[in-house]
Image (cartoon, rainbow, N blue to C red):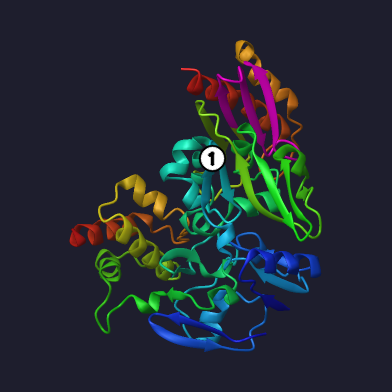
Amino acid sequence: MDVLTPRNLDEALRLKSDLPEARFVLGGTDVMVELNFRASRPPALVNLAELGELRGFTTDGGELRLGAGLTYTEALSGRLAERLPALAEASRTVGSPQIRNRGTIGGNLGTASPAGDALPPLLVERARVELASVRGVRILPLEEFLLGVKRTALAPDELVTAVRLTPSGGPQTFMKVGPRNAMVIAICSLAVVVDDEAGEVRAAFGSAAETAIRVTVPLDEAGALPERVATAASPIDDVRATAAYRRHALRVLAQRALARCLR
Amino acid sequence: MTRIVLTVNGERHEATDLWGGESLLTLLRDSLELPGSKNACEQGECGSCSVLLDGELVCACLVLAAQSDGHEVVTIEGLADGDELHPVQQAFVETGAVQCGFCTPGLVVAVADLLERTPSPSEDEMREALSGNVCRCTGYVKIFDAVRLAAERAT
């Protein structure tokens, strides 16, 4: 198994086009587990860690562009946390400091687990995913990018290069249910934002359907949100919790999130 | 695969003939003869392989060995100054924070990293900083005593 380390994005996109079967790795928090447990033996690995183009975030007017290589540690403090507080809260619940230092927003999108912690906060902020290939760049709303359990709209020659969004500036929060405050895959999770300008409350939940899902209600019907969230969920029974528990917990979280954000 | 060159504990190392999917942890333990970082869960759950990569605390089991090419790694072996223990190691010895010892290298590296960034951590900051380091002897009380002692001496 070869490891290729492109030095710029163009080189990486050429590799993605030439070697669609290769596994692309940045933080390694998902890919390395597959390799360590022999769950995956790709013909080649492409190391994205040397690409400056994927790092950090930039601001363009009101729009933020979060590089796919933005780590949870970078998302949970500083200027970014002020603009995307729910994403910061969610990032702080990811794994441990060791995992947050390596795990990336782009990886969370690429893996597309229904439990991905960054997904609900990005959905409520109406994030769009930037996908690049040698053919060019296209932008997809996050809800169109997420197709199912670990399934996305990514074409074989495409790479997630960034997430773009215009922060609403509205009161927002993220909540997650699990057996401890660290190292936990969400039993269920919920992000809520009250967007006065748009006149709506948006919620998005994780670990209770095939993908993270967004639910929107008009501001003057905010009280209906908990029931709407519970109805939109299609959770399953698994080792972590029952479907009934997840639906109940989401209803409770939505009530608490509203109380927090509508103060 | 191609040759990689990295700095470990201030020394330049070269490695060749690595399997492509090899982790930094395997490289350290099997090729560079630095077995201090422990191999337990291999999925970033236990923290016993914690090392510093370019000054950041990471699980060596989740870093592709090839990703360390051209980078700097500090392992538990690099903390002591000759025969003189690192203050965090000394604090672990004095408070009896070591039981079976398997989790100790990772914890010492994680505590050293915490105190470097936050010299006087609160109880909550300590717990959050060490949330990814599991001690199966459940010796957490003594471990937190060691963190407090090392922090006290550093200020």
Q: Against B54, is A124 above or below? A: above
Please state the horizontal and vertical placement of residue B123, each as a whole percent of the image.
Answer: 31, 47
Q: Against A101, is B69 above or below? A: below
Q: Residue at x 48, y 59 (%)?
A: A98
Please state the horizontal and vertical placement of residue A154, each as a whole percent of the image.
Answer: 78, 52
- Give the residues in magenta: A191-218
Foreground pick, A92 / A51: A51
Q: Residue at x 73, y 30 (%)?
A: A233
Please state the horizontal and vertical placement of residue B155, each as a whole percent of the image.
Answer: 18, 58
Where disc 1 sits, the SS reads helix
Please state the horizontal and vertical placement of residue A204, each as a whole percent of the image.
Answer: 65, 32
Residue A199 is covered by the magenta coloring: yes
| Residue sitting at the far top | A220
Instruction: Locate the N terminus of chain A and report the quarter of the image it occupies.
Output: bottom right
Q: Against A131, is B135 above or below? A: below
- Predominant secondary structure, magenta span: strand
Foreground pick, B82 / A195: A195
Q: Residue at x 76, y 57 (%)?
A: A158
Please give the count of numbered marks on the rendered protein: 1
Foreground pick, A67 / B31: A67
**What's the chain of the residue with tag 1?**
A
Label 1: few (<14), some or many (≥20) within 10 Å? many
| Residue sitting at the far front | A61
Q: Is residue B34 left or right of residue A200?
A: left
In which quarter of the view is residue A28 placed?
A: bottom right
Residue A257 is covered by the magenta coloring: no
The residue at which mark 1 appears reads as A87
In which quarter of the view is residue A175 placed?
A: top right
Q: Residue at x 48, y 64 (%)?
A: B58
Foreground pick, A202 / A253: A202
